[in-house]
Image (cartoon, rainbow, N blue to C red):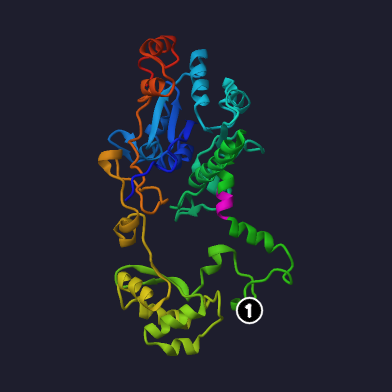
Amino acid sequence: MSEREAPLAGVRIIECSMLGPGAVTTHLADLGADVIKVEPPAGDYIRQMTWPIVEGVSLMHLHISRGKRSIVLDLRTPEGAAVFLELVRTADAVVEAMRPGGLARRGLGYEQLKEINPKIVFCTVTGYGMTGPYRDLPSHGIAYDAWAGLVQPEITEDGSCAMPEHPSVGIHAGPLFAAFGILAGITRARATGKGAWLEVAQSDASAAMDWLRSETWKAYERPQAEVTGNKADDYERRAPGTAGMRDGVRYQFYETTDGHILFMASEREFWKNFCEGVARGDLFEAHPGSQYGDHARGNKELQKELAEIFRSRTTAEWVVFGGEVNTPIAPANTPQTLADDPQFADRMWWLPRDRLGSEQIPTPVKFLDEDLPIPTKAPTVGQHTDTVLRDVLGYDDARIAKLRASGALGQAGDQ
């Protein structure tokens, strides 16, 4: 592997965040950006939030705050605010990941920051955004997926509502959208000298990630003559998204001898390859289907035949078979079994516990012929205060001591 600087070496981000939205800068730190997390004297309570707690610190903090430096500044003090402004002079971007307007209320909003650094990119990441009737509502990550229609309540046997297991989308997608928005802003600012203020709502991100279902419902508001289903369904409108795949047969889960696979032969070519591969050309002759997008929906006779076929081999054997005959078959993993999958082991090697405090999944971004740096462990509150003040701003011990005496760096016992 070649020895090169990390892709974002030389990019500095000042982060003011609470909880999950701080993942905005995790993506940038993973690629080598210098992320300085400015914390209040009591620190970000992400360290105590949710489960699991690993040796007294939450996994959420260990993952989201990896690769960052922490400095304590009490922005309520004039001295603390002044240090913040000096940091902004050295930075490419400032991330405000909390309810909108938090920094502005301290006199440190975009309008003030661009006066001292015209190239600054200011990114606000919130729950529901800076506008609209929900802008000031308190919320947590699952709220955005419920709002966007991604997760529905489950009804238990006693008639109570329960939250089903589900992947969280908005709280993860929002920071991703914000990260590439920041990079777009920095690219332009370095070329033009002009910064920008951008905002990303995690609720918007949930809706954007699930665009196909919402846009399908909107399209179905138009007359049947204008918007139909596809040819394989005789142009009948299916339910949007994966809901319309529930009764699929050639695109469906099947039990194997030791688990389940997902069979996805919706194209005629893949379906024919499968039938020939299992020496069942008769299935293709009896049910050739349409050329594209054919799930053989509701064909119980065919489904029974396929169920019997798939129960004849292991999941791993079927995955290998799919590659050999060119038909799409995927293992059906769980979050627990995923780590045992050979594809995961090849590409998503665990970041080491002895480095980060817990095993963690790395960034999926890969630069060929070079290794990205392994992130540093998530910081304790204010762990790098003195280092940042010395190395970034050039403060000497006397000046740091004076700041500490003023309360700008918090008081003993705050953390």
Magenta region, mostly helix, strand or loop? helix
| Membership of 77 in magenta stretch | no
Residue 271: where, in percent of width, then height?
46, 80
Nearer to us in this view, 149 or 283: 283
Q: Is residue 398 above or below residue 27?
A: above
Nearer to us in this view, 197 or 233: 197
Residue 359: where, in percent of width, then height?
30, 45
| Residue 312 sits in quarter | bottom left
Q: Is residue 379 above or below residue 345?
A: above
Residue at horizontal 63 percent and vertical 26 percent from the top: 111
Residue for badge 1: 234
Q: Which class describes the residues within 10 Å of circle 1: few (<14), some (14-19), or many (20+)?
A: few
Q: Is residue 223 above or below residue 336?
A: below
Residue type for callout 1: Asp
Residue 87: where, in percent of width, then height?
49, 24
Quarter containing the C terminus: top left
Point out the stretch of residues depicted in magenta.
206-210
Residue at horizontal 38 percent and vertical 83 percent from the top: 277
| Residue 7 sits in quarter | top left
Nearer to us in this view, 44 or 385: 385
Residue 92: where, in percent of width, then height?
52, 33
